[in-house]
Image (spheres, rainbow, N blue to C red):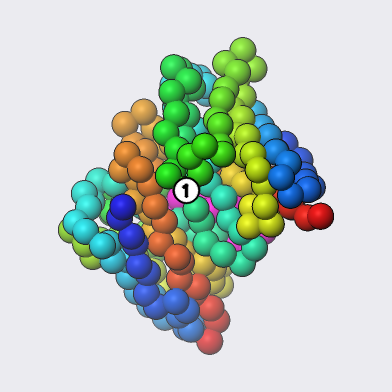
Amino acid sequence: QVQLVQSGAEVKKPGASVRVSCKTSGYTFSDYYIHWVRQAPRQGLEWMGRINPNSGGTNYAQKFQGRVTMTRDTSISTAYMELTRLSSDDTAVYYCARVLSIIQGALGYWGQGTLVTVSS
Amino acid sequence: EIVLTQSPGTLSLSPGERATLSCRASQSVSSSYLAWYQQKPGQAPRLLIYGASSRATGIPDRFSGSGSGTDFILTISRLEPEDFAVYYCHHYGSFRTFGQGTKVEIK
């Protein structure tokens, strides 16, 4: 079965960077885009961007351009999201998610989420 | 940038009642790229509907989606206790956006 397992919670100081990992299993990693979505406390969902695990190509939401980098390691079927220059506004649960199918881009499979807390 | 506006913000209903949730886009979108998710506290979102009207695997048939252009609807025909949650619509074109959510709470 398809599984996405994310790294554990992080506490960071303002100005620092954080990298969250998303280890996948149960399917061919290179075949399906991975997206990153975040959710601030008591807020809605916010799309951050996506990576094509086959090519490494990325698309980022304009809000995060210049601060976010999405990468992948195909040898271990893992995607990464790094966010730099953190502020308290970046405190959120970060999710990775896989598209439903090669031709259907809805987010059908989700990781469990990683809480990132930014605090001095 | 496409903005999705969901209404109402909160829907207070009793088990067994019908829920109708709205999602309005700021410009016309392809129904092929409109999804609905359910989220319960402390959990990741779960895909309910994709392509505006197709149910994801394992989703009960009391959930249905409809609409086109700028107006989309998620209907829960008869609310079960486990359906009380927050629901998000999502446009998944080249760049993606979510609605702000509708909370379905027990009246």
Q: Mark 1 lies on which chain?
A: A
Q: For residue A70, which quarter of the picture?
A: top right
Q: In which quarter of the image is residue A43?
A: bottom right
Tell me the residue at 74%/49% (across/down): A14
- Of residue A103 and residue B24, the one placed in the foreground of this image is B24
Left or right of A97 on screen, residue A32: left
Question: Which contiguous range is marked in magenta?
Answer: B40-48
Q: Considering only vertical position in the picture, is A112 above or below A34? A: below
Residue depicted at 31% across the width and 43% down the height = B93
Nearest the viewer among B86 and B26 is B26
Q: Reply above or below: A26 against A5.
A: above
A15 above or below B25? above
Q: Where is residue B91 in the image (x, y as percent from the top left)?
A: 34, 51
Pointer 1: residues within 10 angstroms few (<14), some, or many (20+)? few
Q: Is residue B4 in sight in this rendering?
A: yes
Amino acid carrying mark 1 in the image? Lys
Given residues A15 and A102, the one toward you in this image is: A15
Residue under label 1, please give it: A63
Q: Which of A38 and B11 is in front in this view?
A: A38
In the figure, is residue B72 to the left or right of A77?
Answer: left
The residue at the far bottom in this view is B107
- Magenta span dominant secondary structure: loop
User: Was residue B42 drawn as part of the magenta stretch in this picture?
Assistant: yes
Residue A1 appears at what percent x and percent y?
A: 57, 31
Q: Which residue is drawn at 78% across and 48% down?
A: A13
Residue A108: horizontal and vertical position, in percent?
46, 42
Question: Hey, which residue is sitting farthest top in the picture?
Answer: A75
**In the rendered image, the vertical position of residue A80 relative to residue B83, given as above or below:** above
Q: Which residue is drawn at 49% across and 33% down?
A: A34
Image quarter where the C terminus of chain A lies is: bottom right
Residue B58 visible (yes or no): no
